[in-house]
Image (spheres, rainbow, N blue to C red):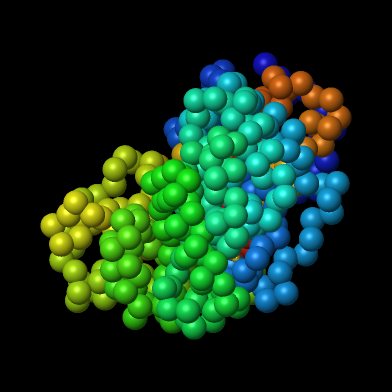
Amino acid sequence: MTLVDVGIPAVRGARPTAAGRPEVPELVDRFGRVARDLRISITEKCSLRCTYCMPAEGLPAIPAEELLTAEEIARVVGIAVHLLGIHEVRFTGGEPLLRRDLEQIISGCREKAPDVPLSMTTNAVGLQHRAPGLAEAGLSRVNISLDSVDRAEFAQLTRRDRLPSVLAGIRAAHGAGLTPVKINAVLMPQTLAGAADLLGWCLEHGHELRFIEEMPLDADHEWARTNMVTAAQLLEVLSARFTLTEVGRSDPAAPAEQWLVDGGPQRVGIIASVTRSFCGDCDRTRLTADGMIRSCLFSDREFDLRTPMRNGADDAELAQLWRAAMWNKWAGHGIDAADFAPPERSMGAIGG
Ligand code: SAM
Ligand code: SF4
């Protein structure tokens, strides 16, 4: 099949080329990887201002007419699952809870994909009021970002004093059955000393905790290889309080390496995206809130799905465009390369 010309503007990167691509339905790339996991950002807005992600003033607003609507998101999920072999869909942002039509988005996607896990990455601010409705709409589970259980430290890192709301959100997610609730914590120099407390808190409450190495995706461009906290530094800190036994990854595409804590069964995970990159096994494809396909967090080459969709392209044409976009995925993030430059869009604008 050849690509149908449906009016793709060249604003953000070149038109994808499918030259050399085998005629298979899945999202394969030149390096033999197959994308099965779709991350959809649904807003650039956020209730927090984490220093490793957002600028203090927030991101520039995406004009309302450029945001994918609930119906468009459901359509895209249907295409991804039925035509492209996507096995799992995660909603992210910005903060997904800031979409007032989130329940409608979830129920629309659930209707299109009744058997696929639909999860959400959230900061949980305000989740306590919406967890039951989201579960009812068809959300399967949540990943919640929590970097510190110390209120002052949390407020300093997120520039907002919202820890009590986050903790209430975590309890509500459990109560609504959005389980397993996984907690994500980005490793920062100022929270390293409290990492063992955070792990202790998660063990006590039965949450699975994953630490994430900070990536050069902060809007302020302050990330530096020399002052990021590495997985090795974290292991040293945690080992002073806990006995950790390495068990590896649950499957090759799972980014978190796992350790049993004090003999298990509870575990802690570390996503060492920088020092132990897993790009060779990456199975992600991303869609930004304004409808751009992004094959990698670090690639500024985006392919516009929204314009052709609004210009009347059918599902098969959109699927073929997506296949071509993913065929062009890079081998890896290249953070260690001498000429590495962080992408234009920060994490909150791409969707983590
Ligand atoms: N607002 C939601 C939240 O915080 O969970 C969803 C969006 S947020 C961008 C998604 C994930 O990206 C969060 O777990 C966050 O900690 C992570 N993240 C943000 N900036 C990051 C960075 N520079 N390096 C690594 N992870 C980052
Ligand atoms: Fe908002 Fe999530 Fe970025 Fe924090 S990490 S600023 S909660 S989008």
For the residue pair 178 and 38, the one nearer the viewer reads as 178
In the image, what residue occupies the spot 28% across and 63% down? Answer: 204
- Residue 287: x, y in percent? 65, 43
In the image, what residue occupies the spot 63% across and 52% down? Answer: 96
In the image, what residue occupies the spot 62% across and 26% down? Answer: 111
Residue 161 visible in the snapshot: yes
The answer to which image quadrant residue 207 occupies is bottom left
- Residue 215: x, y in percent? 50, 64
Residue 284 visible in the snapshot: no
Does 245 sit above or below residue 296? below
In the image, what residue occupies the spot 63% across and 57% down? Answer: 95
- Residue 53: x, y in percent? 59, 67
Rendering quadrant holding ligand 2: bottom right
Q: Judge from the rendering whether residue 165 lies leftward or rightward of residue 241; answer left or right.
A: right
> Which quadrant is home to the C terminus?
bottom right
Does 153 sit above or below residue 295? below
For the residue pair 77 and 202, the one nearer the viewer reads as 202
> Which quadrant is home to the N terminus?
top right
- Residue 232: x, y in percent? 29, 69
Q: How many marks?
A: 0
The answer to which image quadrant residue 340 occupies is bottom right
Q: Judge from the rendering whether residue 51 lies leftward or rightward of residue 17; answer left or right.
A: left
Q: Judge from the rendering whether residue 341 lies leftward or rightward of residue 72; answer left or right.
A: left
